[in-house]
Structures are given as C-alpha cells and as structure tokens.
Amino acid sequence: MEKLTKREDQIMQIIWKLEKAFIRDVIEQLPEPKPHYNSVATIIKILVKKGVLKSEMIGNTHQYSPVVEFETYRDDNLTNIKKKFFGNSFPKMMAYFAKEENLSEEELSELIDVIKSNKTKKS
Amino acid sequence: MEKLTKREDQIMQIIWKLEKAFIRDVIEQLPEPKPHYNSVATIIKILVKKGVLKSEMIGNTHQYSPVVEFETYRDDNLTNIKKKFFGNSFPKMMAYFAKEENLSEEELSELIDVIKSNKTKKS
DNA sequence: ATTTAACTACTAATTTATTAGTAGTTCTAC
DNA sequence: GTAGAACTACTAATAAATTAGTAGTTAAAT
C-alpha cells in the first residue's frame, strides 16, 4: 500500500469515518482554517490515483469511498511502529503499556478478558 | 516536542541506538543509497535547532547526542497512534497488539502479573 | 610539501507536498 | 434569463522537506 502524506492521511481518516463522502462533507469535518475546496479536491484526486479511494458519480458530483480498508491501513502502520519503538519485543511493549497507563480495575479485567478469550479462540 | 519529518526520524532512530554519533557513523547506518555527507549534516543541523540533538566538539569534529529521550518521543507518538487508530481507547490498542502476538501461557500470565504488580504499587 | 579525505559553514537546487487560481458547467432561485 | 453557489477539469503557485554544491580548513599519508 502506498504511503500517505499527512494531509492525505487526515482526509482518509475522515472518509473512513464517514464511509462515503462528498468533498463538501470532508471540508465540513476539517478543522479551521478550512482549506480551499480545490485543495481538498486535489488531494482526493491523488488518493484516487493511489488506489486508496474510488469515486462514483451521484447526479453530477463525485462521491468518494475507501478502497483500502481502515484496518489494512492501520495494520500497515502499526507493523512499522511496533518495530520502530519496541524492536519487535512484545514483553517490552507490554511493560510500556502497563507502566504508562493508569488502568482502572475495570479496564484491567476487561483487558485480561480480551486477551484470554482471544487466546482460547486461537488454540 | 517538535514533530520530526521522515528523514529526521530515521536519523534520530540511528542516533538513539548509537547514543552518540559522528555524521560518518550515521551514514554508515543508513541504507543504500547513502545520501551525501552534507545532506545528512543539514538534517542534523535542523535537529539541533529543533532541540532534539546537541553537539559537542571532539577534536575538530562534531559529535551528536540526543537531548530528547527515545522514550519521550515514543510516548508522544503512541499517544497519537492510540487516538488515531483506536479512538483513544487503551484497552482496544492493547487488545490489538495482544491479538497480533501469539502469547504463550507463560507470557500471558507474566504480562498479567506485571500489570497487576504495577497496579498495586500505584494504589 | 603536496595530495587526499573528511570535515567545516554556508548556500543553492531539487523534489515532494500542499494550496489555490482559472475557466467552464450545472442547478436553483429570483 | 441572469445571478449565485457548488461543482467540474486542469494548471499554476507556494511551502516544506531533502539533497547536494561551493569554498575553505585540518590532519594524515606518500
């Protein structure tokens, strides 16, 4: 999957959230200062060319929706991040999580449940 | 902390690993095609200006070392990632990573112990 | 002692990313 | 029917990031 620039990423986050969007919808979601309509249109055209978005003509305006799933993009990103920050050491990563977060009892047991149930499914 | 560009990030990863480095050391660690010496020097100067690196004159060449700790940078990044990919939910993020890994029973209980003991210390 | 390599500081060029202008179309409302 | 808003496709300008050139210094090697 092609890398996204910061602006492309920002716009994709919006479209993933909305699932389908016209350019005006994207602009609406963008924070101030709102970019020019054509600026957004340009980035979106790049995203189509990159194969991340597809466009459909609804009436006479384009509606855009993701081709690449959010989860795919996320996984791509996290693979790199995990390696970059934890050198593929899972225990290190977990130690980090445990230290950084102030887990409530609920969160902790929820977490353990999730891990356990997941473990069971796999074995 | 100031955001780092891709190249800046790449060079910082190397210097964090080496702890101290001359420009030649950084180039050595960079993959082919090796950039021009001055290209690396420019980026490093930017990093000094951003306050991420400091330089020391050793003989008559500069040696560079991090001002910002790797852990600080990592934590900054992970905070963003949590927000971007997991709706700011820590358990979701952790569940994701847990699923990615094939935890052995030992690892799992070790993990739980770590989190629990940490919890105890804090309360 | 002169050549070479690695450095210095500084500047300039190139590439990539982002923003937005121009010109023309369609639709809606007065 | 004409004015305005929102769109189209295309192009151009600007800004940010990256690469590398110039000129001069230092140190070591033949």
Image (cartoon, coloured by chain):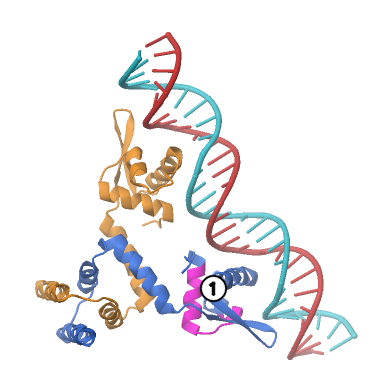
Chain colours: A orange, B blue, C cyan, D red
Q: Quadrant of residue A26?
A: top left
Res. A5 in view? no
Res. B5 in view? yes
Residue A93, percent from left and from top: 29, 79
In the picture, the quarter occupied by the C terminus of chain B is: bottom left
Number of marks in picture: 1
**Predominant secondary structure, magenta span:** helix
Kind of residue at disc 1 = Gly
Classify mark 1: residues with Cα within 10 Å, few (<14), some (14-19) or many (20+).
Answer: some
Q: As rendered, which of D30 and B45 lies closer to the eye?
A: B45
Q: Chain of mark 1?
A: B
In this rendering, the answer to whether D11 lies above or below A8 is above
Identity of the residue drawn at 28% across and 80% down? A90
**SS assignment at label 1:** loop
Q: Is residue B22 magenta?
A: yes
Q: Quadrant of residue A2?
A: bottom left
Residue that carries the numbered disc 1 in the rendered image: B51
Bounds of the magenta span? B8-25
Q: As rendered, which of B34 and A76 lies closer to the eye?
A: A76
Q: Is residue A43 magenta?
A: no
